[in-house]
Amino acid sequence: MSGRTVGVELTKWVERDQLEWGKTRERIENDYLRIAASERERRPDNIGWVWLYDRHRQVKPKHEAQFRQQLYACIAEQTALAEPEWDAPLGAPVRDFIRYPVLGKFLDQIWIHPRPRLHYPEAGGKWILFEGNAGGAYTHESMVKGALDRIRAKIDDYEELDLHSQHTLDELYLLCHYDNEALLYNTPVQAVGFGYEDLVAKVAEVLAQGHGVFNRIFLFHPWESRKVAQVYPVVTNRLQRRA
């Protein structure tokens, strides 16, 4: 409408190390679940879920049959106990694999959860799983670092390029967007005592000291209520509300 020309550069907001780690973990976990194939086995009456904690080793084809046989033998042994330690609301780990050497070669422990009283899971679903794929303990710094690393990389890439003149631009913007890969493999933005607005403030604080050739820099997170946040230059709350 104003006749001004604006160039927009895009970059993915992902933490690359976590991304590669997450994809590797996904392949390993899927392999274990394929071998276990718990959806084809009857769930013991007193067991709700069994979580696997592996030793970060891939099960070779020559060990697959023994691994599966020993896994279900171990579960059957635990099921037959009169007063198992795992028969508590949070369950308990099983780490004694002396009688199951192949299992001990690939698993650090299994965590057995009892079936809640009056709860009957549907037949045919997986009941041997991994606890989750969030990658363990984390701090919010990893996501701040992920956003800043991508933004700084673009600032460095375009430092020597005079795009304003080359493309007759009045302004050049950078949009750093959070995508599905980050959702699947990166730690979440939210942490205890830390949220998306806190992350935006930290990124803006750093960019105030150096923004390169970009006239404006934005974060885009499609799963936050405030999807777009301008992190350079910082817009006051009054102007944001008016906009």
Image: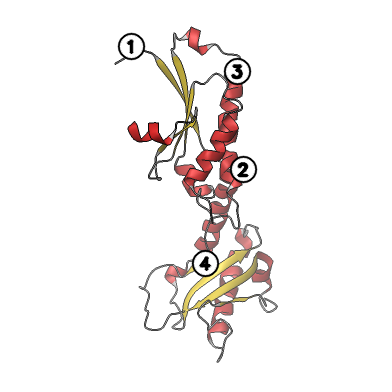
* Residue for point 55% across, 47% down: 23
- Relative to 102, residue 56 above or below: above
Residue at the limit of the structure toward the left, as seen here: 1
Question: For residue 8, what is the image quadrant?
Answer: top left
Mark 2 in CB contact with mark 3 (< 8 angstroms):
no
For marks 2 and 4 on the same chain, the one whose residue lies earlier in the sequence: 2
> Which residue is disc 3 drawn over?
159
Give the residue number, with chain letter if any, for mark 2: 17
N-terminal of the pair, mark 1 or mark 3, is 1
Q: Are marks 2 and 4 in contact (CB under 8 Å)?
A: no
Query: Given the image, on which type of amino acid does mark 1 rest?
Result: Gly
Q: Which mark is residue 36?
A: 4
Q: Quadrant of the N terminus?
A: top left
Which is more N-terminal, label 1 or label 2? 1
At mark 2, the secondary structure is: helix
Tell me the kind of residue under disc 4. Answer: Ala
Residue at left offset 54%, top offset 76%: 112
Q: Nearer the viewer, residue 220 or 233?
A: 233
Q: Secondary structure at mark 1?
A: loop
Query: Quadrant of the image for the C terminus?
Result: top left
Residues at marks 4 and 3 touching, judged by CB atoms closer than 8 Å: no
Residue 82 placed where, x, y %? Answer: 55, 92
Residue with the most extreme bottom position: 82
Find out whether the residues at labels 1 and 3 contact each other: C-beta distance under 8 Å: no
Mark 4–mark 3 Cα distance, whole angstroms, equals 53 Å
Kindly report the distance in space between the C-alpha atoms of the residues bearing marks 2 and 1: 42 Å
Alpha carbons under labels 1 and 3: distance apart: 26 Å
Residues at marks 2 and 3, CA–CA distance in whole angstroms? 25 Å
**Front: mark 1 or 3:** 1
Report the residue marked by disc 1: 3
Secondary structure, mark 4, is helix
